[in-house]
Image (tube, grey):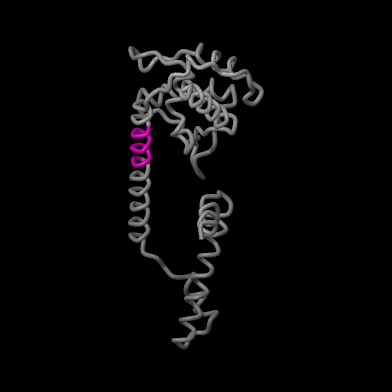
Amino acid sequence: MKKIRSFAKYIWNDPVWNKVLAVVICNGSSTIWSFVVAQTTKLTFVQAFRAFWSFKLPIYYILITVTALCILSIARYYQRKKKAEMQAKEAMKTPLRIYSAIEIQKNKVGDHDMDALIEALKTQIFRLGKTGQNYNAFEIFLNWYPHLLTGIPDQVYDDRTELLIRCARVLEAYGLIKRKVWGAGTNIDLLLLTPIGIEFYTKLQQQYQKSSLK
């Protein structure tokens, strides 16, 4: 059942297949309607089919439909905005794990050495807002990790998301995150973790746990 739902969601959100699906739904509906009318009236199937597609729709129906769609689009935009703001607030409240005292073994994450990657991220400093606290890219990556798993819209809602977006170019340069189009018909990207970013965080956790047991 989950596979069917995920496949249906993929088709619905795909910029090409959703149009194909819309055509199938329209033609299927008109065919069923024409068949029912042909069975219950004196009209033939062809006449019923033509009547369906030549039906004159009053202009106020169109205006009501367009208005309703505009209201739904605006409501969806503010819902996404509110969700992103909540994620931003939660991210900054997430306790920062201190890894500076951990002796991390020299191993690779992608093409990068763990020690070199951590030090490189720590040298990239970003300020929260105009007069806020300074954070380095390593701290920002740790704080935002849980939300980058599901994706963060590349839009500025407040100082916290603006901090992440400015840092995103550094995290992208090291292959820790990537951009993905949020949805069909939008110019908004999602910031998502890459396999390298997940591997990097997992190794940090493993080293932290080993250090805690000593």
How many numbered discs sit on the rendered protein? 0
Outermost residue, right direction? 111
In this rendered view, identify the residue nearer to me: 48 or 206.
206
Position above or below: 59 against 52: above
Residue 84 painted magenta: yes
Q: Which residues are magenta?
A: 78-87
In this rendered view, identify the residue nearer to me: 57 or 22.
22
Position above or below: 158 against 5: above
Query: In the image, residue 8 lies at what x, y percent?
Result: 52, 57
In this rendered view, identify the residue nearer to me: 206 or 5.
206
Residue 98 painted magenta: no
Taken as a whole, is the magenta stretch helix, strand or loop? helix
Outermost residue, bottom direction? 42
Query: In the image, residue 129 lies at what x, y percent?
Result: 36, 17
Query: In the image, residue 65 lies at what x, y percent?
Result: 36, 56
Tell me what residue is drawn at x 59 percent, y 33 percent.
195
In this rendered view, identify the residue nearer to me: 33 or 157.
157
> Could you say which quadrant of the image residue 139 lies in?
top left
Position above or below: 178 against 183: above
Horizontal side, residue 60 vs residue 126: left or right: left
Position above or below: 31 against 169: below
Tell me what residue is drawn at x 42 percent, y 26 percent.
143
Tell me what residue is drawn at x 50 percent, y 14 percent.
122
Outermost residue, front direction? 214
Query: In the image, residue 124 lies at what x, y percent?
Result: 50, 13
